[in-house]
């Protein structure tokens, strides 16, 4: 179990979904929390769940506001340092999506998605670097499988998550000398309601969840608590030698099948090659044996001939001696 006792952790988008589950998970592991979200009522509900999980009320800071607002970000970092004296972990979880293709997307929606999913992450991380340097802390970015694969109808969201993944890799290298670790989680379909907030109807959402069971290797969609546990691991000293990593969901069945087929083909080819090699070796051995046999026969013949010659010579000598007498 990861040890996060007294680790001062900032979690964005903590009022619902993965952010809320992460806050509760960290609370259970003894962390001190600075939580932010737009919905004050939901944020207070998260704080209540964190108290129930084990973090005392006075070790929880709530900052209500839009993470895209520069002042909210400054307040979040400033108040966290003022209350706890340091920052150990930053979890960039706040995210936004919108269902739209290249032909239909409004640039205002595009800008908003990029602002929440990318720009706010960059600027908040910048504000935290000096504090994370002192604690040799960790940053965990909540990305998505959409960052590694293309899905139609989610253009801006896909692009933003790809940008976030590249940000993770770049910043991990840039901050490695300061001993700050930067990683990301890239989960598949998780029941958070982001799809509905992105414009999916209730009926379509039910169908989507059902279909998602067939596209995930484990035959089901993920739960927010499962992602929260992965974030906790990456934030803890259990992952002390991991940086610049992306932890994705399990590969699709289809892909697995393809991989299996490829593996089978490779195995078959290897077997064929081995068989051919064996045959060649056998042939060579046979040839060698034949050659050896021939050589032996020749040698035997030569020996026989030599013996015969010797015998003849002996006989001749004997005859000569007899004549002399």
Image: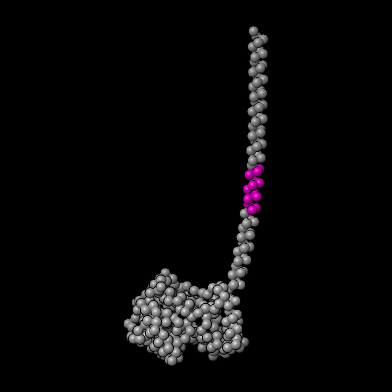
Q: Is residue 318 left or right of residue 158?
A: right
Secondary structure character of the magenta stretch overall: helix
Q: Is residue 294 above or below residue 107?
A: above
Query: Nearest the camera: 263 or 302?
Result: 263
Q: Looking at the image, which is closer to me, 52 or 4?
A: 52
Q: What is the tally of numbered marks visible in this picture?
A: 0
Q: Is residue 140 left or right of residue 201?
A: left
Q: Is residue 261 above or below residue 157?
A: above
Residue at horizontal 66%, vertical 23%? 309
What is the x, y in percent for residue 270?
A: 61, 58
Please tell me whether residue 282 belongs to the stretch shown in magenta.
Answer: yes
Q: Residue at x 65, y 35 (%)?
A: 295
Q: Residue at x 43, y 74 (%)?
A: 233
Q: Residue at x 41, y 89 (%)?
A: 44
Q: In the picture, which quadrant includes the C terminus?
A: top right
> Residue lying furthest front in this view?
52
2 vs 36: above or below:
above
Closer-to-camera residue (88/116): 88
The answer to whether any part of residue 164 appears in the image is no
Q: Position of residue 61 (x, y in %)?
A: 37, 86
Residue 279 in sight here: yes
The quarter of the picture where residue 237 lies is bottom left
Question: For residue 253, which quarter of the picture?
Answer: bottom right
Lateral position of residue 50 relative to residue 300, left or right: left
Q: Provide the residue span drawn in magenta.
A: 275-287
Q: Position of residue 25 (x, y in %)?
A: 42, 79
Identity of the residue furthest to the top in this view? 325
The percent position of residue 132, horizontal first and vertical second, equals 37, 78
Quadrant that contains the N terminus: bottom left
Q: Quadrant of residue 41?
A: bottom left
Residue 265 falls within the magenta-colored stretch: no
């Amino acid at each position: 179990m990861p040890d996060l006792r007294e680790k001062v952790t900032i979690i964005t988008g903590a009022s619902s979904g993965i952010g809320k589950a992460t806050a509760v998970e960290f609370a259970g592991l003894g962390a001190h929390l600075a939580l932010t979200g737009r919905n004050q009522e939901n944020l207070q509900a998260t704080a209540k769940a964190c108290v129930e999980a084990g973090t005392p009320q006075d070790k929880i800071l709530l900052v209500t506001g839009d993470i895209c607002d520069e002042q909210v970000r400054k307040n979040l970092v400033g108040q966290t340092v003022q209350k706890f004296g340091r920052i150990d972990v930053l979890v960039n979880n706040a995210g936004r999506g919108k269902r739209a293709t290249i032909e239909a997307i409004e640039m205002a929606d595009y800008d908003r998605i990029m602002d929440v999913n990318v720009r706010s992450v960059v600027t908040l991380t910048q504000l935290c670097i000096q504090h994370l340097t002192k604690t040799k802390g960790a940053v965990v970015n909540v990305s998505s499988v959409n960052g590694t694969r293309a899905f139609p109808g989610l253009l801006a969201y896909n692009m933003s998550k790809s940008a976030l993944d590249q940000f993770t890799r770049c910043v991990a290298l840039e901050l490695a000398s300061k001993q700050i670790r930067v990683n990301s989680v890239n989960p598949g379909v998780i029941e958070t309601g982001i799809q509905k907030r992105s414009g999916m109807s209730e009926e379509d959402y039910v169908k989507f969840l059902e279909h998602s069971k067939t596209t995930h290797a484990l035959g089901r969609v993920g739960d927010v608590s499962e992602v929260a546990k992965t974030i906790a691991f990456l934030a803890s000293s259990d992952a002390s030698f991991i940086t610049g990593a992306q932890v994705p969901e399990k590969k699709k069945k289809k892909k697995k099948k393809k991989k299996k087929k490829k593996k089978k083909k490779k195995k078959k080819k290897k077997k064929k090659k081995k068989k051919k090699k064996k045959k060649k070796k056998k042939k060579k051995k046979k040839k060698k044996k034949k050659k050896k046999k021939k050589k032996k026969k020749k040698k035997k013949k030569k020996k026989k001939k030599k013996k015969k010659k010797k015998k003849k010579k002996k006989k001749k000598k004997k005859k000569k001696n007899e004549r002399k007498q």
